[in-house]
Amino acid sequence: NAGVMQNPRHLVRRRGQEARLRCSPMKGHSHVYWYRQLPEEGLKFMVYLQKENIIDESGMPKERFSAEFPKEGPSILRIQQVVRGDSAAYFCASSPDRGDYGYTFGSGTRLTVV
Amino acid sequence: GQQLNQSPQSMFIQEGEDVSMNCTSSSIFNTWLWYKQDPGEGPVLLIALYKAGELTSNGRLTAQFGITRKDSFLNISASIPSDVGIYFCAGQPTSGTYKYIFGTGTRLKVLA
């Protein structure tokens, strides 16, 4: 029973390129969350999605960032025209409900912008 | 916005010692979670607390949901080297809200 799968584990992008981060939730989980962790800091909420719907994207920067969770396939967090400040660990989590009982995190994607 | 103050920020302890860390907020939370993060990995849920005053154990770990609903603590008894990592508290601000506010973490290092 695989957990939350994220890929790639590490991603290096030059400034101005696009970064695509993928997340497959646990089997049976239809709620997906993305969090960002800057070095030496806690996790910050970015976006909450259910299948084909963005429920809350209040934590996501208004420009360059987008997220989707299509009917088929993984959830994607997309960052266009990356800048150095986007370097961080991006964690995806999933839950079978609205997360009242916590959720399960993946191992993260560590994005480095050079 | 709401913030969680977690202390201590880091600690070195000898193997076999007990460890205490806590998390405080100026706001009320309905749920407290404690996670552990190993280097290069995602956070793993250790304990979840749902009611004020609740005391819950998971092996050598014990956590409590403060009576005021503004704090929580985590104790680790008889620490071992594999307890090394970063411990995060996370609070759910209001009932039914899926967002969690995370503390900045307590970095634990165990000296054998």
Image (cartoon, helix red, strand yellow):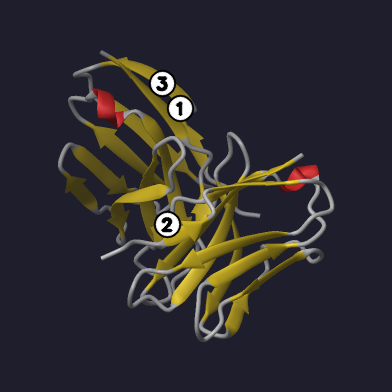
Q: Is residue B105 visible?
A: yes
To which quarter of the image does residue A101 belong?
bottom left
Marks 1 and 2 sit apart, C-alpha to C-alpha, by 24 Å
Q: Would residue A97 be found to the left or right of residue B97 on screen? A: left
Residue at image point 76% right, 44% down: A85
Disc 1 packing (10 Å; few <14; some 14–19; many ≥20): some
Quarter holding residue B15: top left
Nearer the observer, disc 1 or disc 2?
Answer: 2
The residue under label 2 is A105
Work out whether residue B92 can be spotted: no
**Count of labels in the image:** 3
Name the residue beneath numbered marker 1: B8
Instruction: Compute the Cα span from label 3 to label 2.
Output: 25 Å
- Determine the chain carrying the residue at label 2: A
Using the image as rendered, state which of residue A37 and residue B3 is in the foreground: A37
Q: Report the front residue among B96 and B86.
A: B86
* Mark 1 vs 3: CB contact within 8 A: yes
- Residue A73 versus residue B107 in the image, above or below: below
Quarter of the N terminus of chain B within the rendering: bottom right
In the visual, does A94 lie left or right of A59? Answer: left
| Mark 1 on the same chain as mark 3 | yes
Apparent side of residue A60 relative to residue B7 in the rendered image (left or right): right
Q: Amino acid under label 2?
A: Phe
Q: CA distance from mark 1 to mark 3?
A: 7 Å
Which residue is denoted by mark 3 in the rendering? B11
> Which amino acid, mark 3?
Met
